[in-house]
Image (spheres, rainbow, N blue to C red):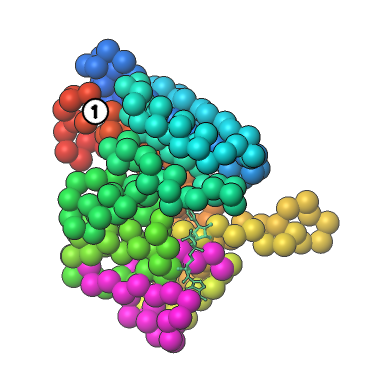
């Protein structure tokens, strides 16, 4: 069998186009643009690329982008002051603090300082609790993007067996909560799981969020399974090349022979993350300004 390729790049582009339509309608109704603030501390090159790309896509969607950069040696208090100002700023609907923070800062404390109703990354304990208890809140962007791809491919997920590999707070755990909410039977696998291949083989849906290049092999999969590969890993450069290839946590060559559908890396889950961030910021703007947004519109 040769798997269908789930085109996250195209899906994300359609989502951004829908967001732009609703962002324009929001501006007409509220008399201001929806606003997303992104805070970067230090100059980690990967983080700088993400932040630039977030700012660019926010503006392209017709929303206001507020970028705040603090030096790597800024104090934690300076960052907490900035977050407090953004919490109080009516032009800012969503706040994202780019992680990782420098080692002298306490990430948990900084995330906890973000107003949960502006926490468009869904990282605060309040939003994690809302997700776990089935209340409305902000859901972390990457797992929500994965869920959108799964529902687009499979329709109703109720009764399906799902294995999420990875138990991080930003991907694995919220992914499992989302699948549970869709009435899947969910297993969370992790670094201490015994016989991971056997666990994966029982699943109609496999979400891999591990950070280990090409770990999940085709012969681990149930034939026809839907495979979502969250991993982004750069292989060492081949002879003479400046950069190594980007690969996921799934061995695409063997998995695509067995799966029913699979996301490629790059071009699968990756592009969904920022698109969902814009979605969450626009939802926050509607709530903050008291402007109605039809359920499921974006
Ligand atoms: P993490 O390091 O916080 O968590 C990794 C998880 O994998 C852990 O829970 C660990 O228990 C599990 N794990 C480690 N080794 C394992 C093994 N041998 N078998 C089974 N489980 C194992 O990572 P994360 O932040 O959740 O990210 C996971 C991957 O997803 C990374 O490659 C990251 O780059 C990628 N990622 C991509 C996006 C995106 O936008 N596409 C967003 C976030 C993360």
Q: Quadrant of the N terminus?
A: bottom left
- Residue 232, image x, y percentages: 55, 57
Rendered image quadrant of residue 184: bottom left
Badge 1 density bin: few <14, some 14–19, many ≥20, Cα 10 Å: some
Question: Does residue 43 appear anywhere in the picture?
Answer: yes
For image coordinates 64% across by 58% down, the residue present is 234
For image coordinates 64% across by 44% down, the residue present is 44
For image coordinates 42% across by 63% down, the residue present is 168
Disc 1 within 8 angstroms of ligand 1 (CB)? no
Rendered image quadrant of residue 224: bottom left
Q: Is residue 193 magenta?
A: yes
For image coordinates 72% across by 62% down, the residue present is 236
Question: Does residue 260 appear anywhere in the picture?
Answer: no
- Residue 210, image x, y percentages: 49, 66
What residue sits right under mark 1 in the picture?
Answer: 288
**217 vs 94, nearest the viewer:** 94
**171 vs 90, nearest the viewer:** 90
Task: Give above or below for 71 relative to 140.
Answer: above
- Residue 191, image x, y percentages: 48, 76
Q: Which residues are magenta?
A: 184-212
Task: Give above or below for 21 relative to 252.
Answer: above
Q: Quadrant of the C terminus?
A: top left
Q: Is residue 41 magenta?
A: no
- Residue 91, image x, y percentages: 35, 21
**11 vs 125, nearest the viewer:** 125
């Amino acid at each position: 069998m040769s798997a269908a390729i789930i085109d996250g790049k195209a899906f994300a582009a359609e989502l951004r186009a829908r967001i732009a339509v609703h962002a324009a309608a929001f501006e007409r109704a509220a008399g201001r643009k929806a606003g997303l603030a992104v805070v970067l501390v230090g100059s980690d090159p990967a983080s700088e690329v993400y932040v630039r790309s977030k700012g660019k896509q926010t503006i392209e969607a017709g929303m206001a982008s507020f970028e705040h950069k603090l030096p790597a040696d800024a104090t934690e208090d300076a960052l907490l002051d900035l977050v407090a100002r953004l919490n109080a700023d009516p032009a800012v609907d969503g706040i994202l603090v780019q992680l990782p923070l420098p080692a002298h800062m306490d990430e948990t404390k900084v995330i906890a300082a973000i107003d949960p109703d502006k926490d468009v990354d869904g990282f605060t304990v309040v939003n994690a609790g809302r997700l776990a208890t089935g209340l409305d809140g902000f859901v972390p962007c990457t797992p929500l993007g994965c869920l959108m791809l799964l529902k687009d491919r499979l329709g109703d997920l109720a009764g399906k067996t799902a294995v999420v590999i990875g138990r991080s707070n930003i991907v694995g755990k919220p992914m499992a909560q989302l699948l549970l909410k869709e009435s899947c039977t969910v297993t969370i696998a992790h670094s201490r799981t015994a016989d991971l291949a056997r666990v994966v083989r029982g699943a109609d849906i496999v979400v891999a969020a591990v950070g280990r290049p090409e770990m999940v092999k085709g012969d681990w999969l149930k034939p026809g399974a839907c495979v979502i590969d969250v991993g982004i890993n750069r292989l060492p450069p081949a002879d003479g090349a400046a950069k190594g290839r980007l690969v996921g946590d799934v061995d695409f060559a063997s998995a695509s022979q067995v799966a029913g559908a699979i996301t490629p890396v790059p071009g699968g889950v990756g592009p969904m993350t920022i698109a969902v961030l814009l979605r969450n910021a626009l939802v926050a703007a509607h709530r903050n300004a008291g402007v109605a947004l039809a359920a499921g519109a974006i």
